[in-house]
Image: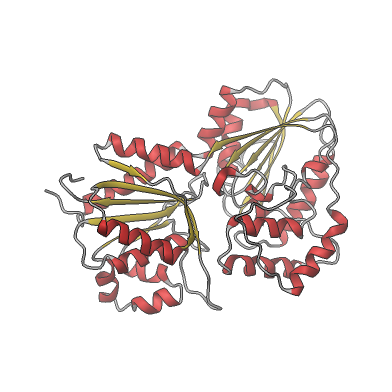
């Protein structure tokens, strides 16, 4: 019987992950959606935003071809390959996870561009995660440095994406339906969305550029006490947040989500002959807490086979954090708890190919991860405390790097526990 620490075992888990990414790529999902529900207008104007914008735009071009008369693609720096070469498509690259001057320029450019859309064309909007940082428009008194400071504060505080994006909306002139208000009346809008938030809340995805902000926050959402400098930003934005949505015709459609990703993982695991256990409770909250809960469950359960979780955890960062992201940190916490175990392997990774501010998607760990890292001179406790999980996992040889995936539907965790079956 194969042991779980074999190279083949890790390859199989990574293969499941890679096959998932292929099936939920933005171009694949957009093309399928447009073929299932065709657009009837002869002229289409295209706007794609987010980390998967280029991939989603490629899917639209594949189906619509020359019917696209004008297009804007706003994505992360170095993510425009494969679409910027297309005629008639203008690609704007901006900052992520922290906004930059290009984010502000993108916001201003899109407001002007959308306000001048031709009356005889329909608008196709393709939204993916990452849009919140990539596109922004601030009231005149607010400088870029305040926006960067706000996002640093949000990203380091362990807040949920729902809370972060509601705060982002409150200081913005275009979030929470503001960009929708720029579209001339009577233009039909088709809005296709890759969801990177729990519950697929359209008002939260990308901070809802084309979705009016709901009047109240969900009951379970806790808005933190905000420092005075953020309250000042909110006050400054009041003058630009009186959006008027007149004669809007818009259809919203979620074309991929974390729920869909987990359903696909169940099928992929089954195709490989594994007994599959899908955990329906969303993966959320602190990465350390979730890592310990998962490790404890895997050690205690008698259910062998493939275990699947989906969602997105959070992290609280020190003043000067090391290298890593929430998936790498969760994986290293699990590795600590499973040290010495011979029958469990766990993969934790983002579907967008990046984890936090790193170019790694996540990690795959087992009971020997800690030993391998320490053999290379790494200190486990220091790595955990300084949020330097990426450095430790690199030393252990356990990082996963995919490159740009062309999708973004939050994170997945795959764990295989050996019983009577082997990979």
Number of labels in the image equals 0
Q: Is residue 120 left or right of residue 192?
A: right
| Quarter of the figure with the C terminus | top left
143 vs 132: above or below: below
Residue 272: where, in percent of width, then height? 26, 37
Q: Residue furthest front?
A: 219
Residue at left offset 23%, top offset 66%: 368
Residue 395 position, x and y percent, is 33, 70
User: In the picture shown, does residue 328 fall above or below 196?
Assistant: below
Q: Is residue 114 visible?
A: yes
Residue at screen point 69% across, 62% down = 100
Tell me where residue 349 appears, x and y as whole percent: 42, 54
Q: Out of 302 and 192, give the one closest to the viewer.
A: 302
Q: How is the image coloured?
A: secondary structure
Q: Position of 186 compared to 17: left or right?
A: right
Q: Nearer the viewer, residue 188 or 28?
A: 188
Q: Is residue 95 visible?
A: no
Residue visible at 22% across and 54% down in the picture: 7
Residue 379 % position (x, y): 34, 79
Q: Residue at 43%, 42% (x, y): give it.
A: 21
Question: Which quarter of the picture shows residue 61?
Answer: top right
- Report whether 250 appears left or right of 417: right
> Farthest residue in the right direction?
239
């Amino acid at each position: 019987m194969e042991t779980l620490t074999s190279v083949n075992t890790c390859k199989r888990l990574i293969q499941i992950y890679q096959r998932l990414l292929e099936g939920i790529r933005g171009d694949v999902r957009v093309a399928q959606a447009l073929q299932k529900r065709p657009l009837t207008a002869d002229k289409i104007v295209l706007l794609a935003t987010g980390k998967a914008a280029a991939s989603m735009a490629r899917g639209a071009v594949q189906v619509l071809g020359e019917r696209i008369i004008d297009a804007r693609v706003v994505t992360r720096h170095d993510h425009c390959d494969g679409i910027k070469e297309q005629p008639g498509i203008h690609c704007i690259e901006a900052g992520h996870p922290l906004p930059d001057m290009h984010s502000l320029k993108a916001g201003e450019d899109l407001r002007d561009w959308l306000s001048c859309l031709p009356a005889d064309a329909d608008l196709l909007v393709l939204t993916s995660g990452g849009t919140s940082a990539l596109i922004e428009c601030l009231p005149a008194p607010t400088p870029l440095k305040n926006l960067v400071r706000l996002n640093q504060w949000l990203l380091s505080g362990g807040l949920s994406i729902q809370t972060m994006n509601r705060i982002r909306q409150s200081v913005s002139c275009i979030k929470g339906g503001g960009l929708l208000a720029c579209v001339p009346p009577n233009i039909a809008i088709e809005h296709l969305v890759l969801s990177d938030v729990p519950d697929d809340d359209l008002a939260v995805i990308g901070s809802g550029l084309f979705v009016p902000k709901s009047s109240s926050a969900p009951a379970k959402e806790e808005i933190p006490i905000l420092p005075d400098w953020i309250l000042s930003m909110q006050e400054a934005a009041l003058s630009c947040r009186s959006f008027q949505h007149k004669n809007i015709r818009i259809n919203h459609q979620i074309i991929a989500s974390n729920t869909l990703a987990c359903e696909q993982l169940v099928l992929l695991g089954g195709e490989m002959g594994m007994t599959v256990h899908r955990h329906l409770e969303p993966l959320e909250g602190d990465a350390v807490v979730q890592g310990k809960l998962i490790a404890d469950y895997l050690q205690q359960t008698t259910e062998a086979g493939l275990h699947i979780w989906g969602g997105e955890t959070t992290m609280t960062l020190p003043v000067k954090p090391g290298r890593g992201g929430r998936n790498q940190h969760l994986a290293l916490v699990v590795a600590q708890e499973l040290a010495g175990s011979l029958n469990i392997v766990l993969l934790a990774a983002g579907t967008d190919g990046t984890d936090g501010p790193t170019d790694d998607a996540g990690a795959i760990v087992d009971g020997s991860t800690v030993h391998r890292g320490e053999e290379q001179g790494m200190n486990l406790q220091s790595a955990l405390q300084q949020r330097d999980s990426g450095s430790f996992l690199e030393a252990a040889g356990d990082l996963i790097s995919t490159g740009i995936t062309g999708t973004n539907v939050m994170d997945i965790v795959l764990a295989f526990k050996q019983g009577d079956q082997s990979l």
